[in-house]
Structures are given as structure tokens and as C-alpha cells.
Amino acid sequence: MADSTQGNSRYPTTRDGRRLHAAQLDGPPGSPIVVFEAGAGGTRSGWALVQPAVAGFATAVAYDRSGLGRSAPDTVDRTFERMADDLNDLLDGLAAGDPDRRFVLVGHSLGGPIVRLAAARRPERIRGLVLVDPSDEGIGAMLRPMFPYADSVMFVVLRVLARTGVSRLLTSRLAGDVPADVKADLAREATTPVAIDTMQQELTTFRSELPAWQDSPPSLGDIPVTVISGVKTDRAPKIRAASTAAHARRAAASPHGRHVLAENSGHNVPLTDPDLVVAEICRLVAGPGADAR
């Protein structure tokens, strides 16, 4: 029986010895492994409405990046290279003893660039990518100089809310309809001092490193890529329009690309349109050109 809604805990290690926490729900024997990558400052809990359904047709693993959830913090800057290396170390651990095992990587928001870079480094073992309202270097409006200042103000406020305990209440409300054990995990883990520091590092990486990808993006070759865009304007309308256009270009860059609109969602698609995300993952697990279940 699983430890929680999101499965049994396991603790693979990175190449430099840090322990990462992953929650695993086993799927049919021999099926691909679907690995979920959260957005900036996010944990495995953000996938709680998607992961259990995916376990019906594939092994489903949601993990916490270093410094988030139950994973050990890092001692160096959280660059994209560092985060992609950690993800590939996790995949190495999951494939131990079965070198032919294939993966579908699913990344939300900042998780999108992370899974793209990890896949580009080891394309031979990647069955496909599902990018869920991802950050993308093609969204120029998100890379403007004003955003680092806005980030710094946000983190001042977030630290105050965390000290007063208000952030726990807000986190629980924002989690929506996730199961009670997942809400409890979020309340404990989402706004600890280490988690807030890690989130700030990750956003700094996003602002400073992603513009360089406009000239030299990671090469995904013929890896199938599905991009899901939120439709509702929880962002400024111009940013939403720029995001959707960039997502369409990202999908078109793949020989097996697919661009899907999440009509019920803004940015937080895994919580507001989980069935759509599951269907697109299922399509890639089944293989290019297959109909989703």
C-alpha cells in the first residue's frame, strides 16, 4: 500500500551525494516512467491531481528539487545546468538495472526549461516531453528588466507572511481540491526559510540564464514535444498572448510537436485541468500519433 496519495517515498542521490525525495506510484510492468518537474519553488504536491491517474498506465514519479519539499538543499547556485544534472541523476536511479527503460518528462512553468535541458543531454532515453504552460525564452515579455525588482518585493512580502503563519493558510487555499494529506505536506513544506531561499535562487536563474537560450536553445532532435497553454488571463493579457504564441512555436519546432489549449486554466494547469494533462501524457506513453485514452 502506498505511503500517501502520491505514492511511496524513495531517496535517490545526486552525483555529489545530496538526497532527493521522490514519491513513486508503480504502473504496469515494463511501462515507461513518467517524471514530473514542478515550477519555481514548487514540490511534488503540485502534481497530486495528475500523478495518481497516470499510474494507471505508467509508473509515475513526482520529486522535490534540492532545497524544496523533503530534498536536501544544495550548496551551490541553482543554475539550469545544476537542476538538469539533478534530474538526470534521478533518472539514472530510477532506471538502475534496466538500461532500456524510457521516460516521459513533464514540466510545469520553470520545470519546462529544466526537462528540455535534461532531455537534450540524454535524448536516447526520452520517449517524449509534455511542457505544461512552460516558461520559454520566446516569451520576451517575461524577461524584461522590471521583473527582478518585482521578484525582490515579492520575496520580502513572502518572508513576512511565512513568519506570521499566514502563508500556510494561503497555500492551503490555493491548493484547491487536492487530498488532505497533500494539503498537509504543502502547509509544512511550501514556505519554509530554505524553500523561500531556493525559490528565489530559481527565479534568479530564470531571469539571468533563459535569455541566452534565444540564440542557443537545447537541441531536442526528434523527441516528441507536447506543449499545453493555459488560456485564461491570470497573467497580463499581453504576456498571456506572448506565452501562447511562444508555446505554439516550441511545439512546431518538434517533428512530432503538438500544441494544446487548456480552456479551463490560467497558469496553474496541473490543478485546474488535470484530466487534460493526463490525456496528453497518455498519448506520448502510447507513442507518436496514438490517440489519447
Image (tube, helix red, strand yellow):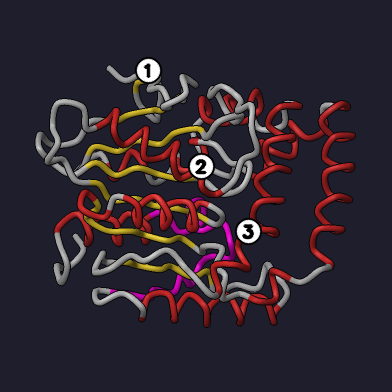
- Given contact means CB atoms under 8 Å apart, are the residues at marks 1 and 3 in contact? no
User: Is residue 7 shown left or right of residue 41?
Assistant: left
Disc 2: which residue: 83
Name the spot of residue 49 as percent of width and height, x first.
43, 44
Name the spot of residue 78 as percent of width and height, x first.
61, 40
Task: Give the quadrant of residue 243.
Answer: bottom right
SS under mark 2: helix
What quarter of the picture does the N terminus occupy? top left
Please state which of residues 117 and 39 is positioned toward the viewer in this rendering.
Answer: 117
Disc 1: which residue: 3
N-terminal label among 1 and 2: 1
What quarter of the picture does the C terminus occupy? bottom left
Tell me how far mark 3 sits from mark 2, CA to CA: 13 Å
Q: Which residues are magenta?
A: 257-274
Please state which of residues 6 and 239 is positioned toward the viewer in this rendering.
Answer: 239
Label 3 is placed on what type of residue? Glu
Label 1 is placed on what type of residue? Asp
Q: Residue at x 37, y 75 (%)?
A: 251
Q: Residue at x 53, y 24 (%)?
A: 71
